[in-house]
Amino acid sequence: MRNVSQYVAEWLWQTSWQASLLIVIVFALIRLCGDRLAPRWRHLLWCVVLARLLLPTLPASPWSLYQITEIVSVRSNARDLAMRVAVSPEPKRQTISDSAQDREFNGTEKAAAAAARPKTVPVAEMPVVRPIGFKQAEVASSVAGEVVDSLPADRHDGDRNGVTNVDATRWILVAWLIGVAILLGRTLLSDVILRGRLRRSRLKPNKTLLQAVASARALTKLKVRVDICVTPEAISPCVAGWRRPLLVVPECLLTELKSAELEAIVVHELLHIRRRDLWIQAIATVATALHWFNPLVWMALADLRHQRECACDEWTLKSLPELDVRDYGRLLIGLSARLFSLPAQVAMIGIFSRPTVLERRITALVITSPSTRWHALVGALLVGLLAAAGLTRAAQPQV
């Protein structure tokens, strides 16, 4: 049990600080590249961070981002060893004359010690003292105390410190497990409750929605079968499920939106299925629960969701060239005013979340420049370099 708890604690610490370093680098890259880096590449950069948060071990590489820490550690140990060797006393060298003098002095000293030594008494003539009753326990206790006191003090301190560290590690892991259980339990419970509500209030889709889904599947080249759920709940349009995806559309949108607007919403949601965003969402939920103590992880995965929505917005506008960017932005604003946003679910993704995040999405749509092949090459290069440097561990350097 001690080895398991120690391994988990070391893995959490190492994974957390290495992922934090990657998070800072990704935020810096996004800031430096600006709108020249497309949202899909930003999302892939965050996927590299997500992989680092969950991988139990990494392959060794001399090009690892964490190589500098290994080099500093080895050089520090070598410096300490060199300092200890430098301050250690040099062994005394004896000459032949010194050895003769030592032998003469040792002989005189032994003779004096033998003369001063008291005469020994045979064991048979020694009086035998037998402790009676509690005297035996007192004698044993005093002897044990003397033996313990004769041991080095640093040995006792080391043992006590080791026990204290193990107990502290176990309590920290207990608190960590409680946090993981609370987060996962709350997310799973809200997911089950929402699915139950949708199942009980499921309505039949009309002809307009069926046509929009058929057209959207052709535009997105989606070959997976998608079930349709029309609900009276005033919630954001969303997709749910892994093996058999489900498209959820509020009933009010079927009468309030035009066919082109409804098609744009359906295209956006089906693109989440095409991009495997539901699987990434589930993995991100687990990563958030495991690293709930790290605020940088929360910031990173929140931006991952934002870049995911921006990527689907960009792909939707490319799939529907007749749809204007401003009209699409007004459509999203209108939906957020009439419908409730969905919280982060395990396997459910809505078209919008908080108003502040939606404002950032619309701003990104307006200011983003068209992506070129050069931009795509730079994005792929950044993702590859970050994966090669961030998903490897430091190799043992040569001292």
Image (cartoon, rainbow, N blue to C red):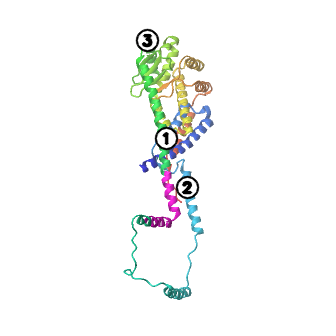
According to the picture, the residue beneath numbered tag 2 turns out to be 73
Using the image, tell me which numbered label, if any, was put on residue 37.
Answer: none
**Numbered disc 2: secondary structure:** helix
Hey, what amino acid is under mark 1? Trp
**Numbered disc 3: secondary structure:** helix
Going by the image, does 300 lie left or right of 119?
Answer: right
**Numbered disc 1: secondary structure:** helix
What is the C-alpha distance between the residues marked 1 and 2?
Answer: 28 Å
Q: Is residue 323 above or below residue 49?
A: above
Viewer-proximal residue, 187 or 207?
A: 187
Could you say where residue 66 lies in the image, as x and y percent from the top left?
Answer: 54, 48
According to the picture, the residue beneath numbered tag 1 turns out to be 176
Could you say where residue 185 lies in the image, as x and y percent from the top left?
Answer: 45, 32
Q: Earlier in the sequence, mark 1 or mark 2?
A: 2
Residue displayed at 52% across by 16% down: 261
Query: 10 Å neighbourhood of mark 3: few (<14), some, or many (≥20)?
Result: few
According to the picture, the residue beneath numbered tag 3 turns out to be 207
Could you say where residue 393 lies in the image, as x and y percent from the top left?
Answer: 49, 48
Find out whether residue 164 is within the magenta segment: yes
| Of labels 3 and 2, the one closer to you | 2
Q: Is residue 301 above or below residue 262?
A: below
Hey, what amino acid is under mark 3? Lys
What is the C-alpha distance between the residues marked 3 and 2?
Answer: 67 Å
Q: Is residue 298 above or below residue 235?
A: below
